[in-house]
Amino acid sequence: MYVLHGLNPSPYSVKMRAILRYRRIPFVWNATGNPRDVAVAAGLPPVIPVLRFPDGRLMNDSTPLAHALEREHPGERSIVPDDPVLAYLNDLLEDFGDEWVTKMMFHYRWYYAADRAFAQTWIVTSRDPLMPEGPRRAAMQAFNDRQVGRMAMVGCTEQNRPIIEDSYRFLLATLDRHVREIPFLFGSRPSLADFGLFGQLQILSVDPTPMAEMRARAPDVYCWLLRLDDASGVDGTWRDPSLPLPETVTALLTHCGETYLPFLAANTRALQEGADEVRLDIQGRPYAQAPFRYQAKCHDALRKKLAALAPDVRRRLDPVLEQAGCLTYLA
Ligand SMILES: N[C@@H](CCC(=O)N[C@@H](CS)C(=O)NCC(=O)O)C(=O)O
């Protein structure tokens, strides 16, 4: 049996849990104590969730984990579209979810007082629901201070706030239109990109400020999240890859080309130049944060995957990326 060590308030944990459920891979959800300790004890990067494979192997980082499950359980409930063009867009939108939408999640959770107060309770009680009042208060304060102290590091600053909040509203509006017409991003079955967005949005649908915004602006997204949390009963198909992409997917890609990808490219450049700040304009407004090494790896992976595609795939894919303003950041 697989064991998933994670926590309910952790976006990447609920992303992996939803993937295992949709894929009908039997697993135990182990959500007590501090799952980060499981990673540290195994010599893994100190992030959650951690998946224990039936043979005892432990692994973390949700993207390589999802791909490892594809190798171990190939077949009909794969979350990678068969068509290589859709498969690339799937990688790109998953990365957008994991690495850009996470800024929205982190911003709303630690910026507004009501969200900070709720997040502390949710996180501390997830680890130990029965802590005595004194240690519980101390743990809540310590976690709050640690996360608030990390906001600038991940780009959640007052200067960047309008960019991040507008991006959240754009994502809500676009996804709301999409899920009223088409069940998931690439058809009537969910892809890894759906689960990438799901992880972050699921948290945004619980933390009070972004929840209110989601329920008011995008009630269909809110209900979509409830469905995707356990999609073990979904039996769908991928969209016909010869058809043009829906306007909503094109809009999301264009949004990536205006926000996340210019940031990724500027981040890579800053790291190459040894600069201590990434600075760029996003949709005509100044954005700044410290360079982030993990996201340079994400950028490199997207570029290498694109470069490795066969010429006939590139002939179909490049015009889509070009039109969305993405190609220049990936080629
Ligand atoms: N790229 C990783 C990111 C995982 C991640 O950042 N997890 C957060 C919790 S949602 C974490 O463990 N952060 C480290 C910490 O808070 O100490 C993934 O996709 O799994």
Image (cartoon, rainbow, N blue to C red):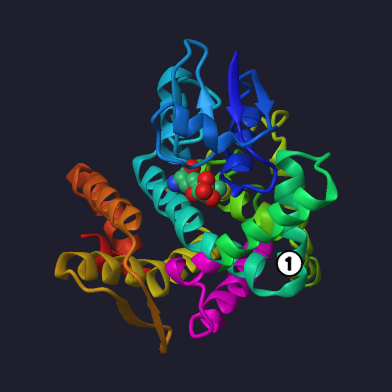
Badge 1 element: helix
Q: Of 213 and 116, which appears nearest the observer? A: 116
Query: What segment is highlighted magenta in the picture?
Result: 149-177
Q: Amino acid at mark 1?
A: Asp
Residue shown at 70%/32% (left/top)?
32
The answer to whether residue 237 is seen in the rendering is no
Position in image of residue 226 (x %, y %): 76, 46
Q: Looking at the picture, tell me which residue is in the foreground, 32 or 60.
A: 32
Residue 175 rendering spot, x and y as whole percentages: 63, 62
Percent position (x, y) of residue 183?
Answer: 66, 48
Count neighbours of disc 1 (C-alpha within 10 A) and say few if under 14, some if 14 to 19, many if 20 or more.
many
Q: Quadrant of residue 280?
A: bottom left
Return the residue nearer the eye: 148 or 181.
148
**Magenta includes 163?**
yes
Which residue occupies 55% across, 74% down? 167
Q: Quadrant of the N terminus?
A: top right
Residue at image coords 63%, 34% = 17
- Find disc 1 in the rendering and name its residue: 115
Determine the residue located farthest toward the front in the rendered image: 134
246 part of magenta stretch: no
Which residue lies at the image location 55% right of the left edge and 83% below the top edge? 162
Seen in the picture, residue 32 relative to 196 is either above or below; the reply is above
Residue 27 visible? The answer is: yes
Quadrant in which residue 203 is drawn: bottom right
Q: Is residue 331 left or right of residue 211?
A: left
